[in-house]
Image: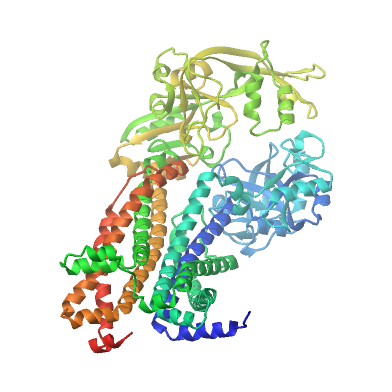
Amino acid sequence: MKVSNQGCIRRLSLRFLLASRTRNIVAVLAIALTAVLFTSLFTIALSINEGIQENAFRQAGGWAHGTFKSLSKEQFDALKGDPLIKEWGVRRFLGMPEEAPFHKSHVEISYCDEKEAHFIYCDPVEGRLPKENTNEAATDTRVLKLLGITPKVGEQFTVTFLVDGHETTQTFTLCGWWEYDEAITASHILIPESRVEAVLQETGVTPPGEDQLTGGYSLDVILKNGSRSIESDMVKILEDHGYEKGQRGQGGNRIAIGVNWGYTGAQLSSKLDPTTAVVLVAMLILILLTGYLIIYNVFQISVAGDIHFYGLLKTIGTTPRQLRRIIRIQALILSLMGIPIGLVLGWLLGGVLTPLVAARLNGVTEMVSVSPVLFAASAAFALVTVFISCRRPGKVAGRVSPVEAVRYTEGKVSRSKEKKEDGKVSLLSMAWANLGRNRGKTAVTMLSLALAVVLLTMTVTFAGSFDMEKFISGFTASDFIVADGGKFQSTDSFSEETAVPEEVIDVIDAQGGITESGRIYGKVTPVEEFVTEDYYRSVQSQWNSQEQIDSMIGYMERTPEGLLADRAQLYGMESFALDHLTVLEGDLSALSQPDSYAMAAVYPEDDYGKAEENSHWAKLGDKVTLRYVERYEYYDPITGQVYEKLEDVPNEVNCIARAVEYRDVEYTVTALVTVPNAFSYRYFGADEFVLGADAFVRDTGTRCVMYYAFDTTKKSNASMESFLQDYTENQNPQLDYESKSTYAGEFENVRRMFLILGGALSFVVGLVGVLNFFNAILTGIAARRRELAVLQSIGMTTRQMQILLSLEGLLYTLGAAVLATVLVLIAVPFLSRTLNHMLWFFTYRFTVWPILMILPLFAVMGAAIPLFSGRAARRRSVVDRLRQE
């Protein structure tokens, strides 16, 4: 028979809750602290994510979801009104200046409407965007500084730039400007669309020009479906208007699209490998476990203290299900008080920690998230943790019988153990026995304390295992590298104009303090290799469709043996540079020998510095023929028409380049190597080979230095840094440099960021553990009030009782320290293997000093907390405590 007693259960839960104020305060604190843990972590995570995303938008050039590239006017008009598009902006690229003062800066001149200017962070802080049919222009403070112009509306400035290869000089009147943002890779000079048309007509360029870009329409869009399915939505827009995704030059109705890689949510699924997923899940479980431990212990101790009451309820017919419901209602009421407090405090804590973390991260814009998802997720996690935590205590209350409830104290001593007592009892043995009375509570309390130590130890180990040499080697290979400014700023191809002059090298050497140095020569004339069609297809399939590859092969020259003549990339390196290569097989000694015809085949590396197998066709001992081309001719494969010069070829004709004056040189591969990124061309697309410096100069006939790299003594390092900074900024601004000291500072920022973040997490978890420990001691003493009174009545002094309680606390903390050590020894080696896989600058170094540092703190806490808790329990007389049931 069903009885409508829900109201009775609710009233009973509420009134019983109000009768235990001390326990309620502890429970609310526990739940609030758990909410603080979740909220602070989610605040930091979401804030960093939004900061990374915001910075990525700046690096990507804007925050629009995607771009339809190089459209005609008709295509632009057709696509912009599609129902899947929420907002749109248009841009028409005109050209870029390349000569000084812009040779170290990426500056684009174009027309943008107001919406597009907003998308690409070009909102004027002074003035406005240019008006049509004027000579106005708006730009940022970096461009104005390079031009020597004061940021003042009405100022005139002149810029010389290339429009699809045609040089032009134009004068503009400044109508607006905005602050330069270092995170944004490109600066913009925005001009009216009418001025774009006038310059195109003046230079004789018909959109989209030979570069398939100049003067065309780029449509940036914000999609109604958000960032969940950017690419598929854009493809659908194309299909709905009769177009296909692809490059414009591929024929048909193909339109190129670009997806904004800055949207981390859209990129997560493609980057979430199994290892990363396991680590993320493990971190989530650890966070949940931390919250679970404290709340579970609170309810477990609460149920143990109220077991007599639950037994009496069972005698009058209360069912186990109703008892569990009573506990859940109490948990819900306590959560409604504790979670809001935790959300506010957690957000404030996250707001304090986020700037500290962001300040030590490159590529993160400082911001504190106020996303509703943050608070909703934190509240949900805390509430779920509460209900999971009170599940088992609820079962314990439901299973206990009325008779057991009346006899229950806290834990049971087995009869077998009683028989082993030999009559010798010490305070230490009594403390040890008390810990064993409720092993579950003891284990949970020790584990909650141990987790903080484990997290701190792992944080210190993690940050201490960051390898500065590995980190720096990912960016630079020697103390200093000097090159043309454009070589560091972009992926422009190397040419004679961007070579480092020998007189510059003489000036640098004259500064003194250089211990070793070497030149890396770069290729400035055409060099070809000969590869099989199967190999060419396997390489090009990473970036092109089979149809595209078929088209590319159709316009390549073949040898009588059927090999394809493909472009090859060539290095010439002096001994200092050769010593920085990683040798996979063979050796490099033959490359330094006079009249050598030895070479090394270069294998690219993945993101973790591991050479990619089968990324090069040349193996150790292979003979490689390189063709040094002095002159090409161009012929139409359809008509057979031959053209002497490339500029003679009509725009509508696709010709094959055929070498007519050349030298073939055969080399032997004596080593397989990887080249540090700092010494590389910094762009890819061709097989690479390394020659010794003498062989390179002999066979190419050029002495163009791409990089001059050198090491200095520690004493002269700072003076060389100061000299190069002044020399490349004031005396020879065409040049630039990289140094290890710059990246060493970045390394320290990254390491400190992890220490701060891990330390903050350890601190929050440590608070959870301390509160758990305090709760366990306090409720344990409260549950044994009568028992402790009995001991005092038969002769135990106050001092002995204080020692007993302090020993119990010390055993808790000592057990936590031992457990933490075991967990660290088990977990850290496993995590080190995972981190070695995930982070290329990680070298595992184990440390135990965090455990040794925390041991004295644990000792003080273990002795002091029980001491103060016992003093509160002794406020009532022994007689009063003996009279308690």
Can see residue 323? yes
How does the figure colour the protein chain or chains? rainbow
Q: In this view, does 849 lie above or below 537?
A: below
Is residue 141 at all visible to an observer of this figure? no
Q: Where is residue 781 in the image (x, y as percent from the top left)?
A: 30, 77
* x and y, in percent, of residue 134 in the image: 74, 56
Residue 445 image point, x, y percent: 35, 65
- Looking at the image, how many numbered discs can be counted on the residues? 0
| Above or below: residue 722 compared with residue 592 | below
Decide which of 709, 586 is in the foreground and name it.
586
Q: Quadrant of the C terminus?
A: bottom left
Residue 843 lies left or right of residue 425; in this view the side is right
In which quadrant of the rendered view does residue 542 lie? top right
Residue at 46% of width from left, 33% of height from top?
676
Q: In this view, does 533 lie above or below 84?
A: above
Q: Which of the two residues, 360 or 443, is positioned nearer the viewer here?
A: 443
- The image position of residue 177, as x and y in percent, is 62, 59
Q: Quadrant of the N terminus?
A: bottom right
Q: Which residue is drawn at 39% across and 42% down?
A: 740
Residue 216 vs residue 305: left or right?
right
